[in-house]
Image (cartoon, helix red, strand yellow):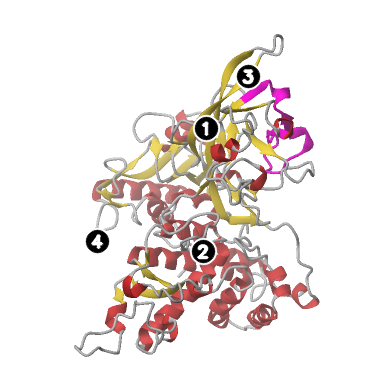
């Protein structure tokens, strides 16, 4: 009997053969297999993937290729098998032939990276044979598709990572942490990507988040600063969270190492104060937690010195990590004590993922919360029952939601529920709460401009733009009576929506001047003005101009809808359809509206 498998590879995956062998943004494809033909080439498997005719171009004619099975075998993720009929298998082949001959979608044929891409092809092909999901058909994130096709409940009670992926793309910057790493076996620095699921608290805030990591053959340079026998967080690595003796934190791993050169001879060795306290952490079991058997002295590894000198270098690895600046360490051969082989040392920027996290403690559940629905949180929000135990407002809303008699009634409460859940995080609800040094002015929401919604005019009849910081009559934008109700409502709507996304992704969308955070920060949309009418010298208040592009808003909306549908699908199984296995199966395969 034939079956379908959905497969994908992560961004920057290098395949096994020539053309179409490198996937810069990730790739998804669909395969048809039949166990009765397992002795045939490729095990009787046919693969179908949608590509631009010229690899790497986001907008151009597309074509269906059958190279993915050979190219990416041994790489990426896979769904469980979905058994289909011979007629369905042929319908899928016919659809692939039609797309290859006539283009994708009849209205605007072609490949468009922002939506009409390999992922959309997979969903459309499956739809042709009657397999539908609760996800939008034109998703743009190929690498997380397979996990959505579990014919059992699978990870339904976990938040869908599509929400986090869209939030990442809206910010358009790839974040990395940069601990100092040693190549111990001489075969090059080996790392694993965030998909490995390793969690570590890089910035010392008590919350471990998803991260890229160094392989077990190599190691991190570490210093157990509180002498508790373990490496607690990133402040005990050598990187951008390392505390400096003069205050603040190091710019990177080599800057952190430099302060250990206490005799200023250009290297860290036995003549320096902390040499005997330094360790190399080899995470042998790749769990992100240091054990005593994983911490090695430098002497035991035959390392005689660490050079402070650094060579600039940038190499992005297929798993999303990046080898940044390079340096070296010196080995001793042990028999004569002479300095010998030079090994490689590098500042490795590890990809950072704040969506997946682990809190260091648990919250005792209240009696009320124990009877309420539950699901996993993400970012800086705890699991739902724990969060409800911290917030009476959330507990009350969740009880109302659980008692709602219809789907429509539950959906009407969903935004309020998400907002109350987000309010239990440690993040500020509004930009204005994050700094008293700036007046915030929301200049645009896509094509909607602030200047189009100012009601007051000056003596010349020109609308006030209201962007100066010196006018003490100017209030917060959301309450400013010179802005019409439509624009003030837009500010409120987007402030709430972005606050919810920030809480569930574990970081702010914008990183304000002078502030730092773990993870991504939006690459565009914030301008700081500290001169002329934009700066109030008496109060020390500048102006931050905020403008969201339409592309950012589209991705933020997609992120929010993915979050919303994920929560709805998980909670309905514990409320309206509790105990109804058939209904549960229907929800898993329901296509999102």
The residue under the point 70% across, 34% down is 274
Q: Answer left or right for 161 relative to 528.
A: right
Front one among 249 and 42: 249
Task: Tell which tag, 4 or 2, sits nearer the viewer.
Answer: 2
Q: CA distance from mark 3 to mark 4?
A: 65 Å
Pinpoint residue 117: horizontal percent, then vertical percent. Answer: 35, 51
Return the residue at label 1: 38
Badge 3 vs badge 1, beta-carbon distance below 8 Å: no
The magenta-colored residue range is 278-305
Dot 2 corresponds to which residue?
Answer: 508
From the image, state whether disc 2 or disc 3 is nearer to you: 3
Depth check, mark 4 against mark 1: the one in front is 4
Residue 331, label in figure:
3
| Spatial separation of the CA atoms under disc 4 and disc 2 | 38 Å
Under tag 3, what secondary structure?
Answer: strand
Q: Residues within 10 Å of mark 3 (few under 14, many from 20)?
A: many
Left or right of 339? Residue 188 is left
């Amino acid at each position: 009997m034939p079956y379908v498998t959905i497969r994908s590879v992560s961004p920057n995956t290098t395949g096994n053969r020539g053309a179409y062998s490198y996937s810069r943004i990730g790739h998804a494809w669909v395969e048809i297999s039949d166990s009765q033909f397992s002795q045939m080439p490729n095990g009787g498997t046919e693969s179908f993937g949608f590509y631009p005719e010229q690899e790497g171009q986001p907008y151009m004619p597309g074509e269906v290729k059958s190279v993915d099975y050979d190219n990416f075998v041994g790489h990426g993720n896979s769904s469980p098998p979905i058994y289909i009929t011979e007629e369905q298998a042929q319908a899928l082949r016919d659809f692939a032939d039609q797309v290859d001959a006539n283009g994708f979608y009849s209205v605007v044929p072609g490949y468009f990276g922002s939506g009409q891409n390999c992922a959309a092809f997979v969903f459309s092909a499956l739809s042709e044979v009657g397999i539908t999901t609760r996800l939008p058909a034109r998703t743009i994130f190929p690498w997380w598709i397979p996990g959505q096709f579990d014919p059992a409940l699978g990870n339904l009670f976990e938040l869908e990572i599509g929400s986090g992926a869209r939030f990442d793309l809206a910010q358009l910057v790839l974040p990395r942490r940069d601990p100092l790493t040693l190549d111990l076996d001489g075969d090059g620095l080996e790392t694993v990507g965030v998909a490995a699921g390793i969690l570590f608290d890089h910035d010392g805030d008590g919350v471990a988040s998803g991260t890229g990591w160094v392989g077990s053959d190599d190691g991190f340079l570490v210093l157990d600063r509180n002498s508790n026998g373990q490496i607690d967080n990133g402040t005990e690595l050598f990187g951008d969270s390392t505390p400096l003796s003069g205050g603040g934190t190091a710019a990177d791993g080599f800057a952190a190492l430099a302060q250990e050169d206490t005799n200023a001879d250009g290297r860290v060795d036995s003549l320096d104060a902390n040499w005997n306290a330094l360790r190399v952490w080899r995470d042998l079991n790749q769990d992100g937690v240091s054990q005593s058997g994983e911490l090695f002295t430098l002497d035991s590894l035959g390392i005689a010195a660490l050079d402070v000198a650094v060579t600039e270098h940038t190499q992005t690895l297929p798993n999303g990590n990046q080898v940044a600046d390079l340096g070296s360490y010196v080995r001793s051969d042990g028999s004569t004590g002479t300095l010998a082989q030079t090994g490689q040392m590098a500042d490795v920027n590890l990809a950072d993922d704040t969506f997946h996290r682990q809190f260091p403690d648990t919250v005792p559940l209240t009696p009320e919360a124990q009877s309420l629905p539950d699901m996993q949180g993400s970012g800086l929000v705890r699991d739902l029952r724990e969060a409800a135990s911290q917030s009476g407002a959330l507990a009350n809303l969740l009880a109302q939601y659980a008692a709602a008699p219809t789907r429509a009634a539950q959906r009407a409460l969903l935004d309020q529920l998400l907002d109350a859940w987000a309010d239990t995080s440690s993040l500020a609800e509004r930009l204005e709460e994050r700094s008293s040094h700036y007046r915030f002015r929301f200049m645009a929401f896509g094509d909607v401009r602030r200047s189009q919604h100012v009601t007051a005019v000056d003596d010349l009849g020109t609308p006030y733009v209201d962007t100066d910081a010196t006018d003490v009559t100017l209030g917060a934008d959301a309450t400013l009576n010179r802005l019409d109700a439509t624009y003030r409502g837009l500010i409120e709507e987007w402030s709430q929506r972005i606050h919810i996304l920030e809480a569930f992704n574990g970081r702010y969308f914008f990183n304000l001047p002078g502030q730092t955070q773990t993870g991504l920060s939006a690459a565009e949309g914030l301008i700081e003005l500290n001169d002329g009418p934009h700066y109030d010298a008496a109060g020390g208040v500048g102006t931050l101009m905020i403008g969201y592009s339409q592309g950012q808003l589209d991705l933020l909306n997609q992120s929010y809808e993915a979050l919303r549908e994920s929560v709805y699908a998980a909670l309905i199984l514990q409320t309206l359809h509790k105990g109804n296995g058939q209904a549960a199966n229907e929800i898993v395969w329901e296509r999102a509206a």
